[in-house]
Image (cartoon, rainbow, N blue to C red):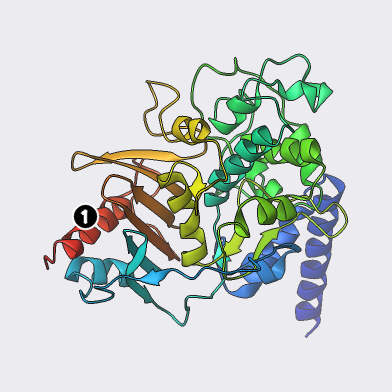
């Protein structure tokens, strides 16, 4: 019994020491990450994590516009390959929109059309949309405006807002999703996101090459908020969510209740049908119901590669060629997608728990190709 008490005492002392050291060396955010992830039965970030964070509300439209159903709505079942893939990779929502009507929809694992799940990095595309809107509204001059105009601490750098949007910022950010000590983990769980971002220095020549860094989009979001003088959830609501007829409120995760800084590198919680509206907006060159919500030249630039050496990325949007067709897409961690083929007037939305097992290896994981191929097999009524 004595030995057990002694062991227990040393365990308690060890845990207390670890906790003290984490706070002492400014790694207290790791404890929050442990509470949010491991204490909820997960081993990584998960799609319905919004209750564990502070959130700002993105208000729905006063005149909601539900998607209409296609005349062939749900007339074709999933292909065998798609059915197996959706099961294996934990799909919770699968949507095919053809000619601006719902052609196919299905929900899984207890989720439904109104379930709110995390966009993860699809929020980068939405944040870049807000950049285009801020330029239209005159809050930001153009893509070439230096970030030092908004944050003078970057007066030594030549980075522009366009460099942030196209992932060419030159920041010394390390994009890591596995290490709890990484700046990416700190950004997700710390309570002072601005401090984390403004500690990032520009260490490479900006504007010359693509390098995917979540910190670029977070800094861009901070600039949009500073330039507009508006909370980003409110700006998103008035600029897009309401004009596009969103049916449901959405949530934008904040760093904490005091700073209330939106995580623009990730973390808008919404549903498949409302996320799909951004695919339609860009497919239709920034126009919605005859109103130009986003400048068409900005949209055109966004869905074309900025750098010839990196044809996979434009300004906030991913770009992929498959089967002789050009697709652009919003893309998020664990396989959150809005995939658009404008000439065929097709939008594919997939939300779920996992990507295919080759995550982190190719530029585009196997699941994306599968979703595209099997959607077209369904449209062509092939099993």
Residue 304 lies, in percent from the top left, at 40, 30
Residue 68 lies, in percent from the top left, at 40, 71
Is 145 displayed left or right of 106 in the figure?
right
Q: Say which of 216 and 97 sits in front.
A: 97
Q: Residue lying farthest bottom?
A: 1
Image quadrant of residue 381?
bottom left
* Image point (25%, 56%), residue name: 370
Tell me: residue 121, above or below residue 82.
above
Tell me: residue 216, above or below residue 1.
above
Residue 196 lies, in percent from the top left, at 76, 40
Residue 91 visible in the picture: no
Determine whether the residue tagged by mark 1 lies in a helix, strand or loop.
helix
Q: Quadrant of the C terminus?
A: bottom left
Image quadrant of residue 170?
top right
Q: Residue lying farthest front?
A: 290
Number of on-image labels: 1
Q: Say which of 135 and 368 sits in front.
A: 135
Is 214 displayed left or right of 284 in the figure?
right
Q: Say which of 338 and 119 sits in front.
A: 338
Q: Quadrant of the N terminus?
A: bottom right
Tell me: residue 204, above or below residue 52.
above
Is 166 displayed left or right of 345 in the figure?
right
The residue that mark 1 highlights is 373
């Amino acid at each position: 019994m004595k030995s057990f008490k002694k062991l227990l005492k040393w365990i308690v002392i060890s845990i207390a020491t670890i906790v003290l050291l984490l706070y002492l060396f400014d790694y207290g955010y790791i404890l929050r990450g442990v509470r949010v992830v491991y204490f909820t039965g997960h081993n990584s970030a998960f799609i319905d994590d919004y209750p564990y964070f502070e959130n700002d509300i993105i208000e729905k439209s006063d005149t909601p516009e539900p998607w209409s159903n296609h005349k062939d709505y749900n007339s074709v079942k999933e292909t065998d390959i798609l059915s197996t893939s959706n099961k294996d990779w934990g799909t919770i929502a699968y949507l095919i929109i053809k000619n601006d009507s719902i052609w196919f929809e299905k929900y899984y694992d207890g989720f439904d059309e109104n379930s709110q799940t995390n966009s993860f990095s699809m929020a980068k595309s939405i944040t870049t949309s807000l950049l285009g809107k801020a330029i239209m509204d005159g809050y930001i001059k153009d893509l070439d405006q230096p970030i030092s105009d908004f944050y003078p601490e970057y007066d030594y750098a030549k980075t522009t807002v366009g460099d942030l949007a196209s992932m060419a910022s030159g920041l010394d950010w390390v994009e890591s999703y596995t290490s709890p000590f990484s700046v990416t983990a700190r950004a997700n769980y710390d309570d002072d996101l601005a401090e984390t971002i403004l500690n990032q220095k520009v260490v490479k020549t900006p504007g010359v090459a693509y390098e995917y860094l979540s910190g670029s989009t977070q800094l861009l979001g901070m600039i949009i908020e500073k330039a507009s003088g508006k909370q980003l959830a409110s700006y998103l609501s008035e600029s897009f969510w309401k004009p596009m007829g969103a049916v449901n409120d959405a949530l934008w995760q904040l760093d904490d209740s005091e700073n209330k800084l939106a995580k623009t590198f990730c973390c808008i919680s919404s549903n498949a049908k409302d996320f799909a509206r951004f695919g339609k907006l860009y497919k239709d060159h920034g126009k919605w119901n005859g109103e130009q919500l986003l400048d068409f030249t900005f949209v055109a630039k966004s869905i074309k590669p900025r750098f010839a050496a990196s044809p996979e990325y434009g300004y906030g949007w991913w770009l992929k060629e498959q089967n002789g067709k050009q697709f652009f897409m919003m893309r998020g961690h664990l396989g959150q997608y809005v995939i658009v083929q404008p000439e065929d007037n097709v939008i594919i939305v997939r939300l779920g728990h996992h990507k295919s097992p080759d995550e982190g290896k190719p530029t585009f994981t196997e699941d994306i190709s599968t979703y595209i191929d099997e959607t077209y097999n369904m449209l062509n009524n092939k099993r």
